[in-house]
Image (tube, rainbow, N blue to C red):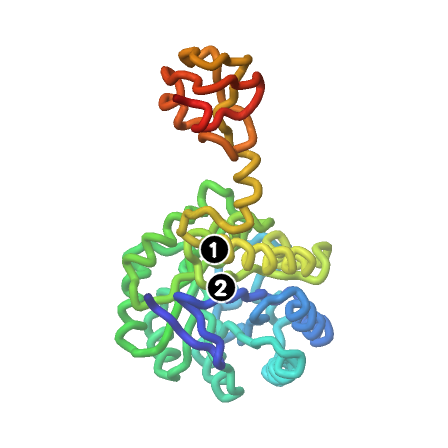
Amino acid sequence: MASMNINGRPIGDGAPVYVIAEGCDNHMGSIEAAKEMCLRAKLAGADCIKFQHHLPDEEMLPDVPMTSNFDIPLYDFLKLHALTLDQHAELMAYCEEVGIQYLCTPFSLKAAQELDELGVDAFKIGSGEMDDIPTIRAIAALGKPMIVSTGMATMEEIRRTYDVLAESGVEFALMNCLSEYPPIYEDVNLGVLDIMAEAFPKAVIGHSDHTPDLYTCFGAVARGAKILEKHVILDKRTPGPDQSVSIDFSELRSLCDGARKVEAALGCEKKVHESESGIREWAHRSVVALRPIKAGEVITQDMVWGKRPGTGIPSWRMDEVVGRTAARDIEGNTLVSWEDLA
């Protein structure tokens, strides 16, 4: 099984799921809001808070035609609200202070190079950049772990990127992802996690979730996702391009707590646990005389049936009782014992 390591935190087979709180641009350009997101993500139990480094003129044309779920063009939004490199440096230092991993998505090669100089431990690559092979190859050459989302991609396109990353020698993850904001549940296809794990054995497989709640995240953990990414926002009333797919930090706490509980429940050994033993004694059924039975009577089915507790002859052995002769008088509505039978 594939594994990777980000600043000493193992990710992959045998390690707890790595939870990324995606802060995106929900800070609306406020460094104080971004710091508050870092702190709350830490308190909620996330492993990582992630932001985005935008250099708008490096990543898009001003008049690029695009769909949007927000009321101003993305280019204009980023010009107004994107964090500066100095602010990213401040956030990275603050994350170290409060004890949470800082990550960032570069949306251009230049942004990645700037983050590399800043000293980031890994790169998160968005779905839009997944098939930009020249950029993928150049970022991989920086030698740091990469987490790559695969929204709006075919398996053939993912394979192309996978081959480039596998050849590069960097540790990397591929995130099952759907670039609908928000998606319908029928489009999420959590079963793709299994397909990706088989098809891309050198990649850690995770899940980046854009639903407005937590259910598919828990399902992803149950299906074996080793990374979870979820957009977070301080106040769901804050406008922004990611508002509709973001959870608040109370929900993030529930996500982290639930993910750990699902992980704890993923064992595959079926046995009688010690804590079940007491319940088993009274909850199972034993053979009980339905009426008084005289010594010498041949026991018929209408004389006996199964009732609690389970401390007598197990009811599954009923056929071994029916047809036997009572060795002594048996009171009605009492457990039948082997000593009662001739």
Q: Residue 92 in the image: x percent, y percent?
A: 60, 81
Of residues 80 and 318, the one nearer the viewer is: 318
> Mark 2 or 1 closer to N-term?
2
Q: Is residue 124 left or right of residue 82?
A: left
Residue drawn at 50 percent across, 53 percent down:
265
- At mark 2, the secondary structure is loop
Q: Are marks 2 and 1 in contact (CB under 8 Å)?
A: yes
- Front one among 339 and 142: 339
Q: Tell me what residue is drawn at x 57 percent, y 76 percent.
A: 101
| Left or right of 270 in this view: 76 | right
Label 2 sits on what residue type? Val
Q: Position of residue 240 (x, y in %)?
A: 65, 59
Q: Which residue is mark 2?
A: 17
Q: Position of residue 127 (x, y in %)?
A: 43, 62
Q: Is residue 55 visible?
A: yes
Q: Which residue shows up at 46% across the image and 24% down it? A: 340
Label annotation for residue 126 = none
Given residues 278 and 25, the one toward you in this image is 278
Residue type indicated by callout 1 = Val
Kindly state the secondary structure of the residue where label 1 is placed.
helix
Structural distance between the alpha carbons of marks 2 and 1: 7 Å
Above or below for 210 versus 229 = above
Instruction: Identify the residue at image location x=50%, y=13%.
Output: 293
Percent across and percent down for residue 198 are 29, 57
Task: Tell me: residue 74, above or below residue 183.
Answer: below
As drawn, 169 above or below 13: below
Residue that carries the numbered disc 1 in the rendered image: 221
